[in-house]
Amino acid sequence: MELNALTSAQQATTQIRNMILNGEFLPGDPVRQDILAARLGISRTPLRQALQSLHDDGLVVHSANKGARVALITPDLVRDLFDMRLALEPMAFRAALPILSKLDFARAEMALDSQTPESTPAELSDLNWAFHYALYAPCQRELLLQTLQRLNRTAALASTIGMSITTQPGTSHEEHCAILAACKNGDDEGALALMVAHLTGAKAALLRALESQ
Amino acid sequence: MELNALTSAQQATTQIRNMILNGEFLPGDPVRQDILAARLGISRTPLRQALQSLHDDGLVVHSANKGARVALITPDLVRDLFDMRLALEPMAFRAALPILSKLDFARAEMALDSQTPESTPAELSDLNWAFHYALYAPCQRELLLQTLQRLNRTAALASTIGMSITTQPGTSHEEHCAILAACKNGDDEGALALMVAHLTGAKAALLRALESQ
DNA sequence: ATTTCATGTTTTGTATCCAATTATGGAATT
DNA sequence: AATTCCATAATTGGATACAAAACATGAAAT
């Protein structure tokens, strides 16, 4: 009996997401059902399911009878996205902070340590969310966590686009380390402030990158 | 040429949503693909698409190889849900308030006036969201509006369950009228405060109903 | 009598096939 | 030569058919 029997539609979802995040498809590019189905070795039925999941995550947009395209990242979208993250993530963080355990710290630390210079954008996005998720998950609010995951998936595309524009390295790793250190020291308010600053900085950097285009 | 050619999967989504909101399926009930497909006169392919949409709206939950069931409404979920609404809806409302037009007021008023004692729970939920949406839509934040719509769909199920428990009539109509009046008077801060109070009250009433069970 | 295994039924997940809508290219007309 | 109209090709949306997994029932063995 398979415990983690991932359905092929779910596999396709992450595979296509990785293709998009790794820059194989650019914003605005059409996403053809036939081509992707042939490439992934599955039929169009589960592939359409995967496209709907990607649509819900804001990575592709659908037009009736005209297929799907990779979503466009606009400054308005980025503002919108990070304003929501700034409103919701501190909420989850604040609820989780008093009950964070050594195991949660270990999970966050592993996410940070797994980042290497050879990591692909998709891997970096996954590890970035793994770090945040480790610090939010104990809050025990399933719907909030689910919403944050969705927002972070859209943010992953935005960040990938942004990093492909600017050549200067991001500061997120140092900020992540500082947040984790504050948590370990029991400085809850400090950790919260650092998290807000982290998100605010990421938003500003992304907007600068987009508007320099 | 049809301008609003709704695909049959989208039609099925709203039809099934209405069945759930109108109490035809209770929380925990299994949602069988064959039965619904036959009843709606469509095949299982678009119906599965509809079920995924309902899953994303939090109305059904999926178990691998075990099908879908109507979601359960727990106090934790309600707290979670309304905390997010309280964080996000004032954000949209604040951005929209300075640019609300007579047309927006008319849309909100029509939503209020369309409610009748004979309205079904599904219709009341639609009109409730139509009222809120009219006051938020001018904020021009697509992702925020999309997220709020999703949360309101989950809230619709919670409210329906709550109203089926308590027999006392809700106070939301009066509160809606007061909010709209404040908007028309240009009292933006007052309208915001009333909206927050409205959501806070709805959350408390719902929790009371659930815990009286 | 209880437990276990096997088989049959039910239900989901996937592939293939058909219909409907849209884009594209060429020919005819002005 | 440019534009419009029609026909054909290409692509998405939906239906049917098939495979595989899970639950239920029942019989046999301890």
Image (tube, coloured by chain):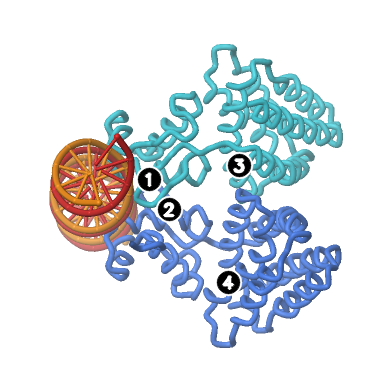
Chain colours: A cyan, B blue, C orange, D red
Q: Which numbered circle lies on residue B52?
A: 2
The residue pinned by badge 3 equals: A151
- The residue that label 1 is drawn on is A49
Specify whether B53 is left or right of D4: right
Question: Looking at the rendering, which quadrant does residue B113 occupy?
Answer: bottom right
| Badge 4: chain ID | B
x, y percentage for residue B163? 62, 77
Mark 1 chain:
A
Q: Residues within 10 Å of mark 2 (few under 14, many from 20)?
A: many
Q: What is the number of callouts on the image? A: 4
Q: Whole-percent x and y of residue D26?
A: 19, 61
Nearer to us in this view, B130 or B171: B130
Q: Residues within 10 Å of mark 3 (few under 14, many from 20)?
A: some
B170 w.r.t. C9: above or below:
below
Tag 1–tag 2 contact (CB < 8 Å): yes
Residue A133 point in image, percent of width and height: 64, 35
Q: Which mark is residue B125?
A: 4
